[in-house]
Amino acid sequence: RSAKVHTNASTHSSESGWLIGGGLGSYSMETKITILSNTFTSTGSSTGLNLKGGYSFQFPKNYINIYVFLTTLSDGEVKYNDINIPGHKIEVENHSGLAGDFGFYVSPKASLYFTLGLAKVYVDYYNYRSSSDSLRHAGPSEPGLLYGVGFGYKVTDHVNVNLGYTTNTSKRKAEFLLRQLPEVETTIDGIKLSTSYKF
């Protein structure tokens, strides 16, 4: 008597659930400030710690992860490329938002995904007018479009590892320098390696 063996070609879990995760990334930043008709560009780079939490909707062949995230930067200072302004300093402190990863499985454990969401940056501007008098203006930008791509690998039914790239451009109304400044535009690009756990 022969026994039939049934195999399941797909080994990923189809159960949805809450997720938490974190990771490390490398980020590049560019800030553009327009004074009258002149635009001054500042650039910088930093490593960042990323934390996220949300819900994972699992389907037989694809998934949707919806989450909020916060990235804190170790060195968010951006420096002027076009002009040297003594005593002026711009620093991008963190990057946060709401995003979704829309993925599809290319094998039982591997997947490709697209990221889409809204994000903002928290920018500090320092104007040291003298040794005893400093002017600081800090605040978040308005939410801007976040998008990217990534690769995911399911270690177990609950643990996933991701390697992804995202870019986000956001603007904030300028409350510093000259009154003629309409806004400050910040672009932050990042490549991060992260892991997540699905309950």
Image (cartoon, rainbow, N blue to C red):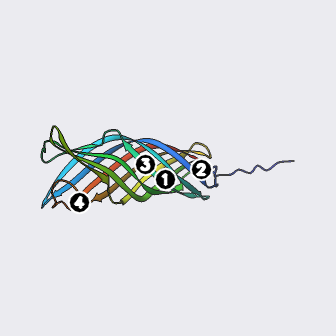
Pointer 3 and pointer 2: residues touching (CB < 8 Å)? no
The tag on residue 12 is none
Tell me the residue that label 1 is attached to.
112
Tell me the residue that label 4 is attached to.
183
- In depth, the one of 189 and 154 nearer the eye is 189
Tell me which residue sits at (45%, 51%) in the image: 69
Q: Amino acid at mark 2?
A: Pro
Q: Position of residue 129 (x, y in %)?
A: 14, 44
Pointer 2 and pointer 4: residues touching (CB < 8 Å)? no
Tell me the residue that label 2 is attached to.
108
How crowded is the residue under tag 1: few (<14 C-alpha within 10 Å), some, or many (20+)? Answer: many
Which dot, 3 or 1, sits closer to the camera?
A: 3
How crowded is the residue under tag 4: few (<14 C-alpha within 10 Å), some, or many (20+)? Answer: some
Q: Helix, strand, or loop for circle 1?
A: strand
Q: Is residue 128 above or below residue 18?
A: above
Q: Amino acid at mark 4?
A: Glu
Tell me the residue that label 3 is attached to.
70
Q: Helix, strand, or loop for circle 2?
A: loop
How crowded is the residue under tag 2: few (<14 C-alpha within 10 Å), some, or many (20+)? Answer: some
Q: Helix, strand, or loop for circle 4?
A: loop
